Amino acid sequence: MVEEKTDPSSGEKTSRGGCPDQPLPYPSSRQPEEWEMEKPAQGPPAQPGGSGSAGGSYPQKNAEILSSQYGINLFLAGLLLMFAWAVHAVGIRKQDLLSYLITIMLIQLLWMLWYICRSYSQRRLIQEKDTHAGARWLKCGITLFAVITLILDSFKIGFFIGFSNCLSATEGIFPVTHAMHTLFQVYFLWCHAKDIIQSFKTLERFGVIHSVFTNLLLWTNGVLTESKHQLNEHKERLITLGFGNITIDDHAPECNCTTTLCSIFSQGIYYLYPFNIEYHILASTMLYVLWKNIGRKVEHHHQHKTLFKFHGITVGTIFGLIVLISTIGIVVVYLIQIGGSKIQSELALTMFYVYAISVLTLMCAAGIVALFIYRLEERSMDNSKNPARKLDADLLVGTASGSWLLSWGSILAIICAQDHPKYTWYNLAYSILVIIEKYIQNLFIIESIHREQEKVNDDIKTLRILTVSNGSTLSLTAADLDNGKLPYMFNGDICVRDRIGDDGVDEVRSQASSPVAHSTSDFSLYSQNTVNNKRRLLKNIAAFLFLCNLSLWIPPAFGCRPEYDNGLEEIVFGFEPWIIVVNLAMPFSIFYRMHSASSLFEVNCKT
């Protein structure tokens, strides 16, 4: 904000540079050739030292380092427990893993309760907020995933009741604890995701980082369980096709179910796991931003509201919905055909690759058009410190490496393979396009979230009306517009209405006596239409890419994974090594699509 002061002689408010808030009147004898209305760009006063981050002192920096190391060790211990259970290590049972997860969830629950109670007791104090963190649409998305996660927990409770005779008590306690954890965490994120913690910073760092890695461990546990299920289904298809020497790693209960709903629960659980996985990874990213904001000093920039408007994105939405509906149909046909016979499997693979090549080609073209539009515009980049935006960019590149790893594995397998089925060349084109499409899309999203928003309505408003005269120029600031001081035409003259005195009496001053020959505007109709057309095209591209990323999230999340089924990579690399690569890379590839969709939604709102 521009600092204002009062002139003692006149009582007028002036800005920092001594410029009057209201323009001085021009002598009536001077006829203006231009009437100019200008509002200068306003920005925050310079802050020495810039925006400091947390931990300007050594104790705070040490607390940041210690808390991060605590979180990493917490995560590694849980990760080794999961690995030991997955490979049937001696002495490691499933209840040991679940007990560890229950314990860290209860610790997080206690910390969240303490933080919420302390925040409530200090509710009258003014607290700084990070306006970029915890967007409302992101909170709505995580709430949707949390609701589905609660349904998943209820299925697990029903499954435990049916097999309670041969399951340990921890398998019933875990979903109950997880449901409580989910409810409290969603409430916590809705109310406190934007907080910038300035008190109890050392304690809060450990509490927040504990929450981050607790969600990462729950995400890893979901990924492991879902990957084992997908791998078992793949092995069952191989057995159906006549491959021998394949054993299915099954952790099924060793007793009979006491209810008739056990099969529904066991099948429904695996269809809900993708939403549970996305819930925990989104929660961990929001909590990580909260951790980075502890002790941070923020620059108080004017925050533009990013509202979603459906108007103007009809074309992109229609094409995106066509892709989405087609994807659902392709996935259904693929899951029915794959594993039925060798011919049906090859047809299913060919169908998937042709469909994916078409979608990826359209996405590449849309991204190139958007980047070309950006090259035509000259808009500065926003380089202010923003942990949420930096995390978004890092996650885009980091998670894209998962699908890049799979694509390069497929390309290398195609080059080295001796036999090449007819769908192999479709796989080659598909793998190359996956790499190119992510390059283009990452560049488009990262540049979009770093571009400064247009400030035509707030910072600079200039309007010139040219008249045929030899007079001077009258300048009127935007404050005059707010006070109702507007020019109007009267008998060919330019007049300005002033409000003087406290009695509300209006005085009309004539500013010109010659007729107006013509008037023009700096923001001409042509340039305004050009800007609007570019914005409309960019919004349609963002909407189209948003729906395409949601579409490409569906196949791998619900079992349509040609990396398992085409068999070429398994022949070249070996069955077990390639399965390990797929199980490690696939979760990042799936998360990339959901994270890209959320980023593109933000791009659409900001454009």
Image (cartoon, rainbow, N blue to C red):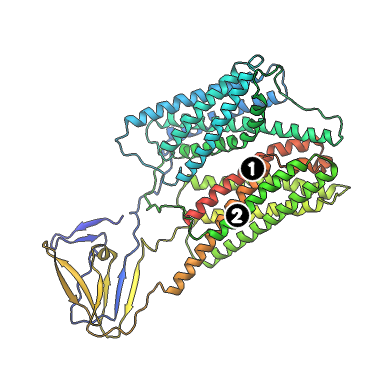
Checking the image for residue 590, the label placed there is 1
- Of 347 and 573, which appears nearest the observer? 347
Q: Please give the name of the residue rendered at 53% of the width and 44% of the height, measured from the top-left corner.
A: 391
The CA span between labels 2 and 1 is 19 Å
Q: Residue furthest top?
A: 165
In the image, 85 versus 18, the foreground residue is 85
Q: Nearer the viewer, mark 2 or mark 1?
A: 2
- Residue drawn at x 40%, y 26% is 114
Residue visible at 58% across and 20% down in the picture: 172
Q: Is residue 398 visible?
A: no
Q: Quadrant of residue 561?
A: top right
**For residue 83, what is the image quadrant?**
top right
Q: Residues within 10 Å of mark 2 (few under 14, many from 20)?
A: many
The x and y percentages for residue 78 are: 61, 26
- Residue beneath disc 2: 320
Judged from the image, the secondary structure of the residue bearing numbered disc 1 is: helix
Image spot of residue 23 (x, y percent): 23, 69
Q: Position of residue 348 (x, y in %)?
A: 78, 46
In the shown orientation, is residue 371 left or right of residue 519? right
The correct choice, above or below, for 214 with respect to 596 in the image is: above
Q: Nearer the viewer, residue 115 or 600?
A: 600
- Within 10 Å of the Cα at label 1, are there few (<14), some (14-19), or many (20+) other Cα atoms? many
Vertically, is 108 above or below 566?
above
